[in-house]
Each structure stands twice: as structure tokens, then as C-alpha cells.
Amino acid sequence: MVRVRFAPSPTGLLHIGNARMAVFNWLFAKRHQGAFILRIEDTDVARSEKKYMIQLIEDLHWLGITWQEGPDVGGQYGPYLQSERLHIYNDLCQKFLKEGMTYRCYCTPEELEERRRIAKHMGKPPRYDNRCRELTDKQKRAFETSGLRYTIRFKVPDELVVFDDLIRGACQFDMSLTGDFIIMRSDGTPSFHFAVAIDDTLMNITHVIRGEDHLSNTPCHILLFHALKQKPPQFAHLSLTMGADRSLLSKRHGAFSISEYRKLGYLPEGLQNYMMLLGWSPKEKKEKFKVDDVVDTFEIRSMSKAASVFDQQKLDWLSGQYIREADLERLVILAIPYLQEAGFVSTDESKIDLSKLKLIIDAVRGNISCLSQIVQEVDIFFKDVVISENHVEFLSSETSQSILSAFYMELQKLNTLSPEIFKEVLKTVQKETKVNGKGLYMPIRIALTGREHGPELYSVANILGINTCKTRIERFLLVKNK
């Protein structure tokens, strides 16, 4: 059975690039009716924090990603926190030492840095020179007596490591350029290489799907799999996501953490859809789709080798499409906290006019890409509008005044207003003024909303009600008489 894993470190918030790796692992597992495992790599004690793990799990669930095994759901191959597996790493490290596959290295960080500097200056690869591999027993005792702390290094053979990457094809690495690498730090915690290889082995991981920044780590991992007498999993290294300037994606490109996108009010299905477009597209070349639409045709080998470019505008467009199609009651529930924070609706939800709120949100949903934007779109319904000097001048023109006067006179004849009645009123105003299209709508829109663009006018008038419409038009009829 296919078994894949997503193994983040809880050292910060989950960002788009990492979340994308989770999405494609999850999609691959669904495609092959396999298992998706969440494993937390928290051996970096200084930087790992429980709050980040909790937030990470919440963000993944919000995105709609589920797993069959993990720290919160358990499973037969646990524990799924690396910090709870230290005894496993230590036992296997001792086994490797006894079998002569590893050795103690007494080189200090300062010595290693100086050697790297010299190698770089001489134009050589800054690899470890393996000098502690052949220490005599006397030298070892001297180091031990001096109290020097040591790391454990794996003996790397001088050979080519060759493997077939599901995305990049045949890959080969000359390990003579690598040097013996650390598998256990001096503080007794495992290196990334060692912990990953052991966990993937013991958790029966069949496919490792991760970013191409890990491609150069893969030969080291393959050597460790062999040392563990385990057949390596299949590897697939996804291209990384870049900003528009082709540099690594960062917050300055407009890309935030998943939790920040949540706070901004993006819908999870829109964000998930967009992440699947980064480096892949379905055979039908559609841009808007759900996982269930593409799971049966997803092939990991069809993913692009080239870096994908994060496009905030495209995300906003796609997110807006989902908002337009979303269930209205769901949007209302999601929008209320933003409106409460803005002071537009009561913090006591029992006092909120939900029927009116539905009309408002339905009217403006076509103009937003995330729910936090709703505040600026709906303020025309909750507070008086502000008119710019240019708009005051526009409304003072003879044509605008004739339209506003005719519109106001028709409102005076009414006791109520609805979308249908409003449309009939506009027909009457058009006949009286002989003005059509934008020329007819614009003075009324600006007088009612203070804006040149926005929701359909009939929706705006219906929500504002006849009395508010009259009041806002009256204000600008006075301009002509000043």
C-alpha cells in the first residue's frame, strides 16, 4: 500500500510552500488509495514550540487535509513526534557504531569552520575531510580524557549513488565529494538525515514527496536506508515556488502563512485549489477544480520541473470565484466577526438582522476575494457616505441634477422600494431625461454610495430602503440651489 508523509518542523507558522507539499502528498495518497501520515520533526529543541504544532494541525484541518496517522490521531507506527523517538535513534546509532559504519568525531565547530574557509579559498568543495575516521585508540583516549564533546559521523563510501526521481528522472551523485556526514549531534539529538531515514523505514513510507531543495540530501538518505537494510522509498522532488522576481517566496511577495490567509478570510477550498496549480494542472487544463474532480487523473510524473511562480492576483481571482459560488448562510457566518470588529453589527448575535445581512453580503460578494474585504464594501449600508470634491462637482452638473431630481420625484410617489420597483423607476427617469446607460446610473450611484463602482444599484436601493435613498438624494439636490 502507498504510504506518504508530511513531516514539518514546528519552528514557525505553516507557509504556502510547505502547505503545498502537504497538499500534493495528500492528493497522491488519495489517488492511490493509500495512507497519508503527519509526522512532526521537533528535534530542534531550541526552535521548536508546541504552539506552532497546534497551529499547524489547525491550519491543515482548515485546508481540508486529513491524515490516517499522526500525533493527534495515533497509529501503529507511532509515536509521530520525533522528540518522543529519541531512544530509537540512540539505539540504532549504537548499533551502527558497533558494526563500524560510523565513528566518533571530535572536531570542534571552530575547527570545521576554519577548514571550510580554507577549502573554499583553495577552490575545493567545503566537505568534511574525514580526519577522525582513522583515529588510533590512543588518539581517541586522549580526546575522551580532555572532555571534548563528539558527534557521530557516517562513513560515506566513494561511489556514485544513482536513483530515479519520479519528477526529475535519473539522478546521480558522486559521494566522494560529500564527506562523512553527522548522524548524531554532540547533544545526543539525531541529525535530519538520520531521523528521516529511520522514521521513513520504521513507518514503511513507500514514497517521499518533498521540495527540490532536498534533492541533494537524497543520496545521504539512500546510503542510510541501505545501512538499515531497507529498500529506499521512491522519491519525487517538487519544484519550489518563487516570487514574481524569481527569488524564493517570502512575505514581501504577498505570500503569507496559512493562518494569516485564514485571518484575511480566504476560503480554504480556493487556497487549496490555487496551491495545486503551482507546478501542476489537470489534463482538462481547468483552473478551477476541487480535489474530487482530479484525484483519479493525478499523476506525480506530470508535475513541472520548472519553478512555479506565486501570483497573488491569480489567487485573488480564484478565491473570488469560490466566494461567488459559496453558500450564502456560510458566508454570513464567516463575515460576522469582521463586521463586529468594524462596529457595523452588534457583538450580541441575537440582535443582528440576519435577513438584511444576507441581502448585503449577497450584494457585495461579487466584489471581494476574501471576507476581510467585506468591511470596505458594506460600509455604505452602515454609515453615511463621503463624497469627494470631484463627485460633488459632477453631481452639480445640469445633467446630473436633472437625473437626481427626476429620480427623487419618483421616490416621493412611493411608500416602499424593491428591486423590481427600482428598475421601473429608472425606466421612468430615463424617459424623462433622455439619458441612458452609464450616464443615467452614475449620478444615482454616486449620490447613494459615494462610489463609481459597486453592487447592482437595484440591490443597493433595496437594502438602503426608500427613506435612506430619499435622504441621500436630497442632500445633493441642494447643491444646485447653492
Image (cartoon, rainbow, N blue to C red):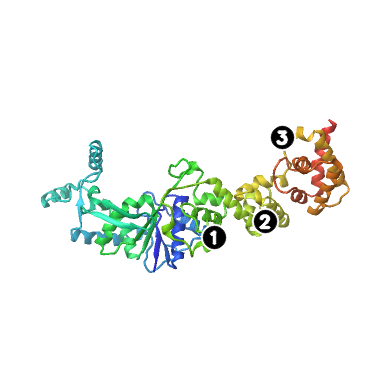
* Label 1 Cα crowd, 10 Å radius (few <14 / some 14-19 / many 20+): few
Identify the amino acid type marked 2.
Glu
Can you see residue 310?
A: yes
65 on left or right of 393:
left
Determine whether 338 is above or below 222 in the image.
Answer: above
Residue 68, numbered circle:
none
Nearer to the camera, 392 or 108: 392
Kind of element beneath mark 3: loop
Residue 388, numbered circle:
3
Which tag, 3 or 1, sits closer to the chain's start?
Answer: 1
Q: Nearer the viewer, mark 3 or mark 1?
A: 1
Label 2 sits on residue: 349
Identified at 84% across, 38% down, the residue is 402
User: Where does the C terminus fall, quadrant-wise?
Assistant: top right
In the figure, residue 107 lies in which quadrant? top left
User: Where does the N terminus fall, quadrant-wise?
Assistant: bottom left
Which tag, 2 or 1, sits closer to the chain's start?
Answer: 1
Label 1 sits on residue: 290
Q: Nearer the viewer, mark 2 or mark 1?
A: 1
Identify the amino acid type marked 3.
Ser
Identified at 53% across, 64% down, the residue is 292
Real-space Cα distance between discs 3 and 1?
43 Å
Q: Residue furthest top?
A: 482
In the figure, residue 290 lies in which quadrant? bottom right
